[in-house]
Amino acid sequence: MSESQGNRFPFYGPQGRLVLVDSALEAVNRGSTTIGIKTPDFAVIASQIKPTHPLMEPSEKIFPVDFHIGATGAGYIGDILQLIDTLRLESQKHRLTYETPIDVDSLAKHLSSFLHNYTTYAVRPQAASIIISGDDQTGIQLYQVDPSGTFFRGSGFAIGQSSDTALDVITKGYNKNMNLEQAIELGRAAIEKALGEKPIVETGIIEPGKAFRKIRTDNS
Amino acid sequence: MSESQGNRFPFYGPQGRLVLVDSALEAVNRGSTTIGIKTPDFAVIASQIKPTHPLMEPSEKIFPVDFHIGATGAGYIGDILQLIDTLRLESQKHRLTYETPIDVDSLAKHLSSFLHNYTTYAVRPQAASIIISGDDQTGIQLYQVDPSGTFFRGSGFAIGQSSDTALDVITKGYNKNMNLEQAIELGRAAIEKALGEKPIVETGIIEPGKAFRKIRTDNS
Amino acid sequence: MSESQGNRFPFYGPQGRLVLVDSALEAVNRGSTTIGIKTPDFAVIASQIKPTHPLMEPSEKIFPVDFHIGATGAGYIGDILQLIDTLRLESQKHRLTYETPIDVDSLAKHLSSFLHNYTTYAVRPQAASIIISGDDQTGIQLYQVDPSGTFFRGSGFAIGQSSDTALDVITKGYNKNMNLEQAIELGRAAIEKALGEKPIVETGIIEPGKAFRKIRTDNS
Amino acid sequence: MSESQGNRFPFYGPQGRLVLVDSALEAVNRGSTTIGIKTPDFAVIASQIKPTHPLMEPSEKIFPVDFHIGATGAGYIGDILQLIDTLRLESQKHRLTYETPIDVDSLAKHLSSFLHNYTTYAVRPQAASIIISGDDQTGIQLYQVDPSGTFFRGSGFAIGQSSDTALDVITKGYNKNMNLEQAIELGRAAIEKALGEKPIVETGIIEPGKAFRKIRTDNS
Amino acid sequence: MSESQGNRFPFYGPQGRLVLVDSALEAVNRGSTTIGIKTPDFAVIASQIKPTHPLMEPSEKIFPVDFHIGATGAGYIGDILQLIDTLRLESQKHRLTYETPIDVDSLAKHLSSFLHNYTTYAVRPQAASIIISGDDQTGIQLYQVDPSGTFFRGSGFAIGQSSDTALDVITKGYNKNMNLEQAIELGRAAIEKALGEKPIVETGIIEPGKAFRKIRTDNS
Amino acid sequence: MSESQGNRFPFYGPQGRLVLVDSALEAVNRGSTTIGIKTPDFAVIASQIKPTHPLMEPSEKIFPVDFHIGATGAGYIGDILQLIDTLRLESQKHRLTYETPIDVDSLAKHLSSFLHNYTTYAVRPQAASIIISGDDQTGIQLYQVDPSGTFFRGSGFAIGQSSDTALDVITKGYNKNMNLEQAIELGRAAIEKALGEKPIVETGIIEPGKAFRKIRTDNS
Amino acid sequence: MSESQGNRFPFYGPQGRLVLVDSALEAVNRGSTTIGIKTPDFAVIASQIKPTHPLMEPSEKIFPVDFHIGATGAGYIGDILQLIDTLRLESQKHRLTYETPIDVDSLAKHLSSFLHNYTTYAVRPQAASIIISGDDQTGIQLYQVDPSGTFFRGSGFAIGQSSDTALDVITKGYNKNMNLEQAIELGRAAIEKALGEKPIVETGIIEPGKAFRKIRTDNS
């Protein structure tokens, strides 16, 4: 009964699964391989830049959100862009209201709540997972937020195509005492192992007291 | 006739069952094993923390709601987070309006009403059961609220995966004169028996006049 | 033709039946056995308290609505709770507006109209029948209101599981000169006969000029 | 083509029939047998009171609407009650606005328009036919209004179960010079013939300059 | 492709037909035979009054709209009544706004626009064709407006059951120099020929400078 | 996949076609043959007037929109009338706002945008193509606007039944130096060739500095 | 399961694909071949003008948006026109608000967000890809925005029919030092190769400090 009912008004499928959210996750799992790595001293977020034809600039995948915060994502580009805008707007609203920079935890929870709304009403749950990183009073922070509104905090994440492989590389190579160059290299290695090739990778860097910055590295 | 009609506009299925709520409960029953234990002197709420990879912090499952109240839940994390926010907001509104802390019964009934609304309109009933505990003028309180808006008051609850087994352990081991350490141990034992393994467990503690606090214990 | 059309937009089924309301009534008929008995001198409302595990307090089934009015119900607990809130709110609005206690007839008609609305629009008709009793200027009053918005006035009602059997016991044992203890016993006997066992029964008592009060009796 | 299309968005069925209104009429035709009789000097409206168990008061079927107007109906009780409320409200609004009693024709047309709205939008057409009678500046008036919003004026009506038989009895026995007692008896005879038994009948009486009043007669 | 798509969201059927409007027209074609005849000196509108039982007044089919305008219709009575109300309201609004009587052309176009709206949104196109006649500064006017919002101006119209036959009679018998009595007789003859029997006919008469008036003629 | 999905929520069919708009165009293609011809010195718009019975005035097909602008259309009359009203309203709003006559290009784009809206939401795309012609500061203008909101500017258009044939006649006979009588004759010839008969044709004429005027010519 | 669920509420199809957006892209791929080429010194946008009959002006495909910005598109003309209007409006709003010309990046992101909204709610995603080019403080800019809201920045783009072939021609012939005439010729060659014929091509030219201008070249 659940099955046929799930077909009609597709909030729930068999075993109470959220079928539209599962579809959104399928799209995320086809997206660019994207990772985040955090140590006590800095954080790195990076994403595969899918190859385009020579005259097209690859899409931006690492997005500054505020002075101290950056984000990246995997899934439909249109959905990612919409969610990044949401983060930027919330961040600016916080500055205007409280005259202080927003903390990363508040920003991740705001995105979680924003995404959750799309799972409850008769609209399309957004097909993007987002990795947010920033530096606030509690130190360097790294979060992952999924289409269902679930969020995670941690020192290493991977989303998108073959993310299991990428996460395995990060987990094995992680050392909280590593330096920034080692972390950037670890992120790149994780993405390359997942894809079995050397893609262009865009990388964002968070360091205490410094503005969020990004670098792009060719596969040359 | 009921059956075919239930397939189309799925408020009701055969025998007048609420089919979307039943789907939500299926999701709850696949969630983390989660318990609550109350004696006249204190209450303990605890939830299995599902194992994650080493670099990801396990999700928070025990949530402070107010100085004197905490909550936990089983089901979709995104739905649980949304309901915890609802509890926190209601609690703060009460403080602002009446300048007194909210009583646990009012908070549980507010959540009941909030969840019931999602069962009546063409939206998604939330897939989460919540256990709320707190200390108010009537003493230590423990409630369970389900996706249909039904709530229960008691001294021992278990929700989520294999909750029948967990509840059986609690019922057999319950003694209203036990001390806090014994109750924490009973909660952990109930979750371990349900899962057949030693998971990480996050535990929240309510004691009269003290702030709600939480502890996490490894399965080491 | 009616049949196939009823399957699509399920307001009406064959013979003009209200199919969603019929589903709601099926749910009511699976609910706790619940009765009401009225004599010129008092009224008694009582409901089976479904057995729970030892550490869970049985759900409240007898609800004070105002100083002079109480109610009970059968069906989905979440729906019953929502309707009781509606009764309490209407009662308080009457006190604030007219500075007099509401009469029971007005309260029953308000609930009737409230429930009827859910049968006309594309929402879920509520799955609960409610028995209301109170003492007003016209004496002791007893009403039953069903999911379709139909209401009845009388001296004896039974709703929920095996309510036919319960009503038969009340009808045979009813005597308008019986005393309160006899009426309480008659209600309990009706519920026990319907269920074929001795359940916990919660009972509410209305007497002229006295506050509505309730008692709970074990099946010991 | 009309047929299949009618199945999907069921405003129209084959031959342009209003399928939901037809379903509502099926429900009316299963309702209590209900009649109205008018002479130049008075009017009588009457309805079968369906037998209930001994402790339940039969539902009211004859409703005072204003000092000079009464109404009755056949169909779902919840729908009838809602429509009677609509008539009472319109009647009071007229008194407040114009400081005169409403005329019966205006009231019937208001109900007609109210019912018609439910046939045009994606809601449930109400399953009740209403007979309205009253005394105004144009004399004694008698109207029937159906779920489609169609209304009729006349000296004799019958709606509900076996209404054809009841109307046949009234037509044959009608004499515009009969007195009130003869008319009441004719109404009762019509209902009894239709049902093939002696039911309880509730009767409402309209006489010029007098308040609408009602009587109930047992089948003894 | 058009065909299956038309079944689901039934605005359009094969060949771009408006399927709900076609259903509405089927209902119009089952309605009372209704005609309009105009000469330079007067206009006559007439409609079959469907036989009812002896105690029921036949429904009014000829409706005064304003001092100088009358209308009639074929289709569902409830829909006709709603449209007549719309005409009366528009007519009164014109008097209040401009302090002059509305011209018949404006009134017909208002009805056309009103009906057209029901063909564009997900509601029920009204199942009635309306014939409007009146006397204004441009002389005697006669219009027919259909459920699609299409309107026609002319000297002779017939709608409802067997309207082709009725229109044929009018066309053959029409003479712009005929007098009022001849026109009334021609209308009656058209309706009788269409129905193959002598029905009651209600007739409305428009003459320059005179109030719209109506007469009813038995088939005796 | 596209095909079955197109059946359910019929915005898109196979190959990304707009299925409801295609249905609307099918209706346009069954409409009256309608043409427009423009030279530097004047424009002519003309439409077949479908034969009616002798007492019914043929529907107006050539519509004055403003002093300097006229329009015609093919498709459902009700839809054409609605669109003409839209043009007239926009034209008057422009005069009130800017105190200058609207230019034809603005008017065509307004209609384009108005029609486009109906293709994007769950309502019915309007089944009419419109030809607009007028004289403004840029000279004589001639536009065609289709149900999808697409518009064209040109010197010769044909829409409705067998419009390909009509357009072929116009293209072959067109000469930008022809005089008004020749253009009127060319339009008539195009319509006659398309229909294979001599219909009544209504013609509208735009000349610089003169009011839009129309003529009707019989097929005698 | 995804497949059948995708059929009912078609946000997502198998593998999490956005099925309505895929349909919209199918329509884009049937549209006019359209290209954009940018060098540091200028940009060129060009689009095939589909042949029409001799008396119809080909549709405009190159649209001035602001003094310094132009745009073109492929897909449904009605949708393209709507999106161009959106660009013009946003551009004017920027001038009024900030008293400076809008930068091209802001304009592309506004269109991206506008298009994304149509993919999330139960409306029709717009069937058009847009190429925007302009000159702002950061130099000459060229963007492509797709129905999903995805946007790209680059030096060469092709959309519409056989765009792969067109893009291949541009990529091979691109030289950032080429002059304007060479770029126009390259664009024309790309379109001709894609279509296998010499179509009319409309071309827009962006040069620093100059107003956006366009030229049309015949295939002679």
Image (tube, coloured by chain):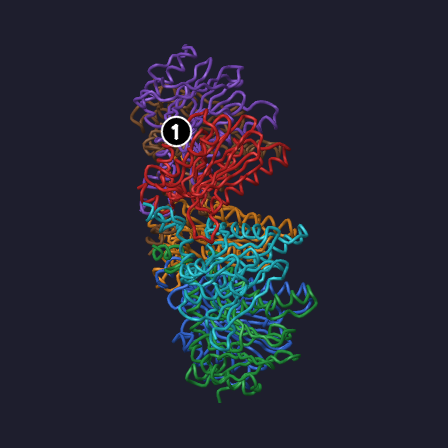
Chain colours: A purple, B brown, C orange, D blue, E green, F cyan, G red
Name the quadrant of the C terminus of chain A: top left
Q: Which residue is mark 1?
A: G173
Towards the viewer: G166 or A152: G166
Instruction: Find residue G124 and report its horizontal and vertical position in percent.
Output: 44, 46
Instruction: Find residue C70 and report its horizontal and vertical position in percent.
Output: 52, 49
Towards the viewer: F15 or E3: F15
Residue C216 visible from this viewpoint: no
Say how many tags the image has: 1
Q: Which quarter of the picture shows residue B218?
A: top left
- Mark 1 belongs to which amino acid? Gly
Chain letter of the residue beneath label 1 in the structure image = G
Q: Secondary structure at mark 1?
A: helix
Few, some or many residues within 10 Å of mark 1 (<14, 14–19, 20+): some
Instruction: Find residue E134 and report its horizontal and vertical position in percent.
Output: 60, 75
Towards the viewer: G103 or B160: G103
In the rendered view, tell whether residue B97 sits above or below residue E220: above
Extreme residue in the right direction: E99
Extreme residue in the bottom direction: E220
Residue E98 visible from this viewpoint: yes
* Side of B191 relative to A203 (left or right): left
In the rendered view, tell whether residue A169 sits above or below residue F53: above
Instruction: Find residue C140 and report its horizontal and vertical position in percent.
Output: 54, 57
